[in-house]
Amino acid sequence: MLKAIIIKPLERFNDERGSFIELMREDWKDILNEDRFLQANFSTSYPGIVRAWHRHLRGQIDYFIVLKGALKICVYDEETKDLSEIISTGQEPKIVRVLGHYWHGFKVVSNETAFLLYFTTRLYDYQNPDEERRPWNDQTLIPKSINGKKDDPRVGKPWDWNYPPYK
């Protein structure tokens, strides 16, 4: 994983009524460190949709939690050319912490609409947004490693969101 990307599995408590999951707690220092989130957002995306690439250059950190469906979340370090790929689903909830200076985005890899809840450490500034964008199919985004592996068959090629995750 790229430096400072943290993944925290979430515990689901089931009983005869359904289930309960704590999504975020201020005392979870293992993932929050000293961060404090200032905004929560909810996004829906249809099957096959790619929402990428963007980054934040003013220090924003994002915390992604897939509530329904499945996402392939990718994070790319332009300096090292390392890419991290995380599959996150509503069935096995986890928090994925992404430093904003990395290029990041996701693709819906489920056959159902995906629900994404995400927290940010900065408020969105409507007059001066902290977002830099590049096309989702940018041919200049070529990873030298994926999840730390240099022998992944996708290494050295433009990133293809439609290629299935390598195992």
Image (cartoon, rainbow, N blue to C red):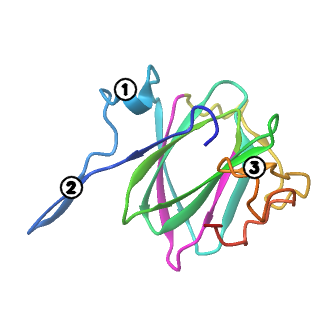
In the picture, which quadrant includes the C terminus?
bottom right
Of all residues shown, which one is farthest toward the top? 34
Magenta residues, dominant SS class: strand
First-in-chain label (1 vs 3) = 1
* Front tag of 1 and 3: 3
- Secondary structure of residue under mark 1: helix
Q: Amino acid at mark 2?
A: Phe
Whether 25 is drawn above or below 143: the answer is above
Which quarter of the picture shows residue 57?
top right
Identify the mark at residue 91; answer none if there is no mark: none
Quickly name the residue at label 2: 20
Identify the magenta region. 104-121
Near mark 3 (Cα within 10 A), the count class, few <14, some 14-19 or many ≥20, is many
First-in-chain label (1 vs 2) = 2
User: Which residue is found at the position 80% from the left and 36% from the top?
Assistant: 80
Whether 24 is drawn above or below 60: the answer is below
Quickly name the residue at label 1: 29
User: Which residue is found at the position 91% from the left and 52% from the top?
Assistant: 140
Q: CA distance from mark 1 to mark 2?
A: 21 Å
- Secondary structure of residue under mark 3: strand
